Amino acid sequence: MTIQIAVTGAAGFIGSSLALFLARQGHQVHACDWADPTGCTPLDNPSDSTPARLRVERLRILAQTPGVHLSHFDLAEPGAFSAWAAKCQPDVVIHLAAQAGVRHSMQAPLDFVAPNLIGFAHVLDACHRQGVRRLLYASSSSVYGMRESAPFLEEDRTDRPESFYAATKQANEAMAMAYHAQYGLRSLGMRFFTVYGPRGRPDMAPFLFAQAIRRQEPITLFAKGELLRDFTYVDDTVAAVAALAGPEANWEGATVVNVGHHRPVSVNHFVTCLADQLRLAPVITYAPMQKADVKLTCASETRLLSMIGQWPDTPLEAGLSQFVNWLQEWDPLDKPA
Ligand SMILES: NC(=O)c1ccc[n+]([C@@H]2O[C@H](COP(=O)([O-])OP(=O)(O)OC[C@H]3O[C@@H](n4cnc5c(N)ncnc54)[C@H](O)[C@@H]3O)[C@@H](O)[C@H]2O)c1
């Protein structure tokens, strides 16, 4: 069945892959981002770590895809999302736009206020007023804060954020619960776990590590590289999101779900696999653990499985191979990125 789906953050890493996936499934995808067709955003300054060239590539692919309808505006602008949603009349809204990045929020927490809090409030309110049947939005594994025990269960406490970024995601979950309590808005917060893959985010560890290995520059690994991360391949993530957005997904009310595999690996292991794919030896230096870093992320996937059944589980080696193939083509290193 074809449905009208609105996707925010469509020039972003996950949003662009998701919009493509949904359109290929035959849905009408109304995709928005504040990045314009030249890849520029109002934040085009050092705080925005994705180069315009990468956003342009993502937007170009979407512009060539039948069933994707692109718009650009700032979600924090009063009335902008509401007017757009009134025009596209989505059955489902998948809200992924945000200022992302734990480390960035350590330097510039205020960059997160307008997109993550005001923008989110605009999306919530428009969905309620326009009777949107289902709202899905990006939350993050970072809401679990500093933990030593695994796996992370959705009902575990999330009131001790280690970063301002995590605090905004936790606030989003609370705001969505309030809109359900007050107005009955049905919503699902998806807690993503370190997503990696082609057209990935240049500020995230997989991308930074790969570029350093390719340039034979030292990689700094914190906490002896022993931090554990539940890495998720982007195609697995978007397949799960698409299934959660579908009519068969088994969730009600306002709730949250982990979108992660319960298969954490050490950062050391991740770097070794990545270096194998690149056929180069990494140059590693170690540094103490950083404030706001968490030791471990590990999703319990029980709730996700109860909502959608099985979902794809791409092995790390296969996912990294796809990522490396894309990166080598996108940035051949003899030209500036
Ligand atoms: N990538 C991950 O591993 C990961 C992990 C946990 C949570 N998340 C969350 O998932 C979502 C998508 O992440 P991503 O990695 O694709 O990030 P991304 O930075 O690549 O994409 C976010 C997009 O939102 C857009 N945007 C930001 N502020 C906006 C505004 N005010 N108006 C309109 N558009 C705006 C950006 O231009 C960008 O294209 C984010 O909410 C992020 O916090 C991602």
Image (tube, helix red, strand yellow):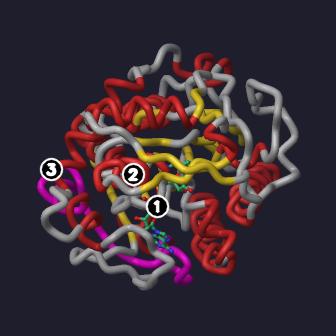
Which numbered circle lies on residue 329? 3
Magenta stretch: give its range.
59-81
Mark 3 near mark 1, Cβ–Cβ under 8 Å? no
- Residue at 31 percent of width and 40 percent of height: 22
* Quadrant the N terminus occupies: top left
Tell me residue 179's x, y (percent). 74, 56
Relative to 330, 196 lies left or right: right
Q: How far apart are the alpha carbons under marks 2 and 3?
A: 14 Å
- Residue at 33 percent of width and 57 percent of height: 30
Report crowding for label 1: few under 14, some 14 to 19, many 20 or more residues within 10 A (C-alpha). Answer: some
Q: Which residue is mark 2?
A: 207
* Quadrant the C terminus occupies: bottom left
Total number of numbered labels?
3
Which numbered circle lies on residue 203? 1
Mark 2 near mark 1, Cβ–Cβ under 8 Å? yes
- Answer yes or no: is residue 175 visible: no
Report crowding for label 3: few under 14, some 14 to 19, many 20 or more residues within 10 A (C-alpha). Answer: few
Q: Amino acid at mark 2?
A: Phe
Q: Within 8 Å: ligand 1 and the Cβ of disc 1?
A: no
- Answer yes or no: is residue 26 visible: yes
Tell me residue 196's x, y (percent). 42, 42
Q: Amino acid at mark 1?
A: Asp
Badge 2 marks a residue whose secondary structure is helix
Q: Nearer the viewer, residue 92 or 11?
A: 11
